[in-house]
Every structure is written in structure tokens, then in C-alpha cells.
Image (spheres, helix red, strand yellow):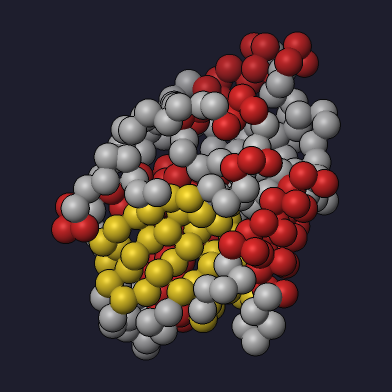
Amino acid sequence: MTDSPTPPPSDARPFSAEPRQDRPHRGRALVHLVRHGEVFNPTGVLYGRLPDFHLSEVGQRMAERLGEHFADVELTHLRSSPLERAQETMAPIAARHPHLEVQLDERVLESTNLLQGRILSAKQSALRDPRVWWLLRNPLRPSWGEAYKAVVARMRTAIVDAAVAADGGQAVVVSHQLPIWMARCDAVGRPLVHDPRRRECTLASVTTFTVVDGRTTRVDYAEPAKDLLPAKVRSRRFVAGA
């Protein structure tokens, strides 16, 4: 599934970040940004970068589905966010490509968030507390966490380095929803400010960047575990440009 609407490859805005000078990227590579599977989080905590949040049973099935999705793909590089849920999502993929070592990369971590550790769902939502409203004062940056531009900058270099490491082949990078969405928005020229409910980046989804000579020329999107998503997520309509 291509980005909707799909721009011609020449219309995708290339990353401006340069590859590492000691290993300049030449040629074409595919970098698959994979969002981790469902996390066991019964209390609805905004877990962010907190440790000890692991995949749920459904999340483990999503990870297995991703392993099947990439089983026959000739992968040449694997890297992952250091967080447990990302490494657990990578495990079935790596198991099918035992000749590849998984590299941990902090540049593809979840974004920092000052609301981390708080409950943001149902009647217990911390957003009802006037003491946190100051954190919401500027959604354009955003004021509650890492600036969108900062997320873009680190994801740009991580994607280019993954393309270099793939050496003309295909790389899988397991990351998180916001960093993946920021990278995609940047690549296709979509505004970084957005409604989080409108991100086209479901659990265990695959957002593929075609990188040519260090520049992203195309973005594609797939949902290998779509049938495992909650019904309300499966039926949600993505609005391009949101």
C-alpha cells in the first residue's frame, strides 16, 4: 500500500541529513520501519520510555506475524529501539534471519514525554488535572515533550545509516509510532503538526522508505497484522494530510 495520495518518486522530499562521511551511501536500499506490537498495559499508563513494558499475548502474535512477513525477504540489516517491546517485536524477525545481528539504536527510541508514567485514559486521565495543563500550552512544538523537529533529525540519520548498513539490500528497523510518523511526514512533505488520532501507523505496521543515494524517494505502507488489531482501529479511516 502506497502513501495516500502517492506522490511520484521525484516529488517526495529527500532527507537533507548526510550519510556518515566514512561510509557514504550509494545505490538503492529499502528501510522498513516497523512499529512494535501491542503492549500489555491494562491501566492505560503513558509508558513512553519507561522500562518493563512488554508485549501482550496479542502483541506476541503480531510479532510472529511480522516474522512471517519478512521470512522470505532477503534482509541484510536489522536494528531496533532498545526498549523491551521493540526488541520483543524484532525477535521473530531475527530468528528467521540468524545470520544477522540486531543492532540497538537509541535514535529510533520513543520520543521523550513529560506526561510519561501518568494515566491518560478514562475517568482517571491526568489531562483532567489543571496542574498538567501548562504542559499542553503549545501543541505546535509540542510543549509536553521532545520537539517534532528533533525527532525528525534523529530519524533521518538513523534511516540513512540503516540504508548504508543494508548495502544495497533491505533493512528492518523496529521503532515507535511517533518517530515513524515524523519520518514519514518529513519524507513526503506533510506538516509535522498533526492530530495523533490520524496517524497511519498501526501496531505492527511496516512503513517502507526507498533510499537512493542517501535520499528517500518513496514511502510505502503495509499492515501485516491488520486482522489482529482491535475492531475500532481496523475500521478507522486514515485522512491523508492529517
Q: Nearer the viewer, residue 136 or 73?
A: 73
Hey, which quadrant is residue 63 in on the image? bottom right
Where residue 98 appears, as percent x and y from the top left, is: 69, 82
Position of the C terminus by quadrant? top left
Residue drawn at x 63%, y 59% is 66
Residue drawn at x 28%, y 82% is 26
> In the rendered view, would you say 236 is above or below 19?
above
Where residue 160 appears, as percent x and y from the top left, is: 39, 70
From the viewer's perspective, is 129 left or right of 206? Answer: right
> In the rendered view, would you say 192 is above or below 34?
above
From the viewer's perspective, is 219 left or right of 67? Answer: left
Residue 218 visible at all: yes
Where residue 176 appears, as percent x and y from the top left, is: 58, 50
Residue drawn at x 50%, y 58% is 33
Q: Nearer the viewer, residue 85 or 37?
A: 37
Residue 112 visible at all: no
Where residue 230 appears, as percent x and y from the top left, is: 67, 31
Residue drawn at x 40%, y 49% is 1
Q: Residue furthest left?
A: 10
